[in-house]
Image: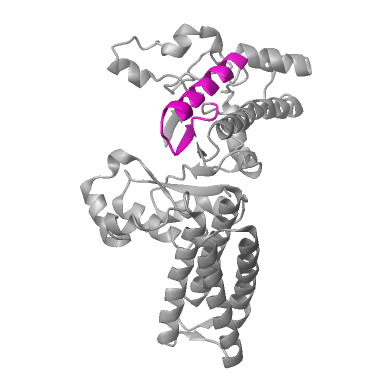
C-alpha cells in the first residue's frame, strides 16, 4: 500500500537532513504559500510542533492532492492507498490554541455565516464555535469521500484506508477535526486503521473497545494498530488479546522496529512465514478468511468436548453439532464460489449458532465467562468479514 501524508506537507525535522533553514515550509508551500493553513496567532506551524499543514477548504489544494492520488493509482501496482495526516494539527481550544484559519477557510465560513472565524472562541459563543468546528471537520470528511470516489472509479479493487486516532469523538473533533466514524458509516473507506498505541494491554483495550466492541461500522473494517517500539512483550500481549476480540486483524507500527528478535518471537507464536503465506488474507479473500477462522474455532470446541470441558444436554448437543457443522460447510461453499444466496444462508446459520451458544452451552473452566464472550467476539469478527466481503463482490 502507498502511505500518503495528506494535509501535512513538510517537516522541520527533514529540513536539517536537507540542509534547509528551519523556517523552510517544504516544496509545496514554498511554491504555493497561499495554500497554507494557520493557527489563531497567524503561525503555519503551531508552537511545539514541526509540520505545516495545507488548508483542506482550498479547491487548489484538493485538486493537487487528488492528482497525486490518481498518479499513484494509475502508475504503480499498489493494492491500496493509506491516507495519513488526514486531519488538522493538534490543538487545545481550552488554552486558546486553535487551527484552521487558512484564507480559503476563512472566506468560505464568513460567506456561510457572516462571521470571520478568527473572532470566535469556544467560551464566548459555543453555538458558533460548534459551527466552526463542524465546518473544519467537514472539509476533511468531504475530501475523504471525494478521494475515495475518485480512486474507486479509477481502480475499483483498490483498498482505501486511513490512519486515525482512537480518542473519544468529542475530544478528537475539538483537537483534530477528524470525524472518521462518518467516513466508516458512509463507506468512504475500506479500513479504519486505529493508531491505538499503548504501553500496556489494559490501556490498549481501553483505546479500542469503543470502536471494535461497542460499535459496528458495517463493511468498513476497524483495524487496531500496535506500536512495536515500546515493549516487545507488551506488543505480543496485545496481539494475543486481539485473537479474542471482534477484529479482522491488526497493524504493526512501524517496519523499522520489526527486527530479527521480534520476528523470531512472531515465528514462534504465529507460525513461520512460509506457513502463514498459505493462509487467506482477509483483505483479499474475506470469505476464505472467515471460513478459516471458523475452522479454528471448531478445533477449539472439539478439543474442549474431547476433554469434557463443555456441558450440554444430549438433545441440545445434537442440534448444536448439526448447526455448527452446517455453518462450516456453508462457509466453505461461500469461500469456494461466493454468491448472495450462499451469503444469506451463512448469515442465517451464524445467527442461530450465536443464539444457541448464549443459551445452551456451559463451559467447565475457571475462565468460562471469558471463553463464552470470546467465542461471541470471534463470531462477530466472522460476521464483519462477511459484510466486508459482500461490499467487494
> At which x and y percent is residue 190?
55, 43
> At which x and y percent is residue 320?
58, 81
242 or 328: which is nearer to us? Answer: 328
Residue depicted at x 39% and y 52%: 200
Q: Is residue 267 left or right of residue 78?
A: left
Is 215 above or below relative to 33?
A: below
Residue depicted at x 44% and y 21%: 51
Observer able to see residue 115 = no
Residue depicted at x 49% and y 44%: 194
Is 142 above or below relative to 27?
A: below
Is 58 above or below relative to 294?
A: above
Task: Read off the magenta span.
Answer: 59-88
Q: Quadrant of the N terminus?
A: top left
Q: Is residue 22 left or right of residue 354?
A: left
Q: Is residue 321 magenta?
A: no
Number of numbered discs present?
0
> At which x and y percent is residue 391?
60, 49
> At which x and y percent is residue 40?
59, 16
Q: Is residue 75 magenta?
A: yes
285 or 209: which is nearer to us? Answer: 285
Q: How is the image coloured?
A: one colour
| Quarter assignment of residue 189 | top right
Amino acid at each position: 500500500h502507498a502511505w500518503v501524508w495528506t494535509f501535512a506537507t513538510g517537516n522541520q525535522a527533514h529540513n536539517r537532513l536537507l540542509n534547509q533553514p528551519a523556517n523552510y515550509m517544504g516544496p509545496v508551500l514554498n511554491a504555493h504559500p497561499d495554500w497554507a493553513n494557520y493557527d489563531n496567532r497567524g503561525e503555519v506551524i503551531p508552537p511545539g510542533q514541526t509540520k505545516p499543514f495545507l488548508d483542506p477548504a482550498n479547491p487548489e489544494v484538493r485538486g493537487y492532492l487528488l492528482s497525486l492520488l490518481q498518479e499513484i493509482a494509475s502508475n504503480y501496482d499498489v493494492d491500496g492507498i493509506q491516507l495519513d495526516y488526514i486531519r488538522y494539527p493538534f490543538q487545545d481550544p481550552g488554552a486558546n490554541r486553535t487551527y484552521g484559519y487558512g484564507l480559503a477557510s476563512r472566506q468560505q465560513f464568513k460567506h456561510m455565516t457572516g462571521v470571520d472565524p478568527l473572532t470566535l472562541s469556544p467560551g464566548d459563543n459555543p453555538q458558533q464555535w460548534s459551527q466552526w468546528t463542524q465546518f473544519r471537520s467537514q472539509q476533511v470528511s468531504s475530501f475523504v469521500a471525494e478521494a475515495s470516489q475518485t480512486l474507486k472509479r479509477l481502480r475499483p479493487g483498490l483498498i482505501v484506508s486511513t490512519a486515525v486516532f482512537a480518542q473519544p469523538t468529542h475530544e478528537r473533533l475539538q483537537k483534530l477535526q477528524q470525524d472518521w466514524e462518518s467516513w466508516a458509516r458512509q463507506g468512504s473507506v475500506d479500513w479504519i486503521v486505529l493508531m491505538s498505541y499503548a504501553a500496556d494491554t489494559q490501556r490498549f483495550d481501553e483505546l479500542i473497545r469503543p470502536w471494535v466492541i461497542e460499535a459496528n461500522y458495517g463493511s468498513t473494517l476497524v483495524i487496531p494498530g500496535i506500536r512495536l517500539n515500546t515493549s516487545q512483550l507488551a506488543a505480543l500481549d496485545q496481539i494475543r488479546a486481539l485473537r479474542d476480540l471482534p477484529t479482522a486483524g491488526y497493524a504493526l507500527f512501524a517496519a523499522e522496529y520489526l527486527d530479527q528478535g521480534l520476528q523470531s518471537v512472531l515465528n514462534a507464536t504465529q507460525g513461520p512465514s512460509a506457513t502463514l503465506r498459505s493462509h487467506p488474507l482477509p483483505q483479499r479473500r474475506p470469505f476464505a478468511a472467515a471460513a478459516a477462522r471458523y475452522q479454528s474455532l471448531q478445533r477449539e470446541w472439539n478439543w474442549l468436548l474431547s476433554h469434557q470441558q463443555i456441558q450440554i444436554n444430549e438433545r441440545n448437543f445434537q442440534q448444536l453439532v448439526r448447526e455448527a457443522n452446517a455453518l462450516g460447510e456453508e462457509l466453505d461453499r461461500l469461500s469456494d464460489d461466493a454468491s448472495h444466496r450462499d451469503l444469506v444462508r451463512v448469515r442465517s446459520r451464524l445467527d442461530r449458532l450465536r443464539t444457541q451458544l448464549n443459551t445452551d452451552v456451559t463451559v467447565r473452566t475457571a475462565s468460562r465467562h471469558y471463553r463464552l464472550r470470546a467465542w461471541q467476539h470471534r463470531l462477530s469478527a466472522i460476521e464483519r468479514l462477511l459484510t466486508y466481503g459482500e461490499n467487494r463482490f
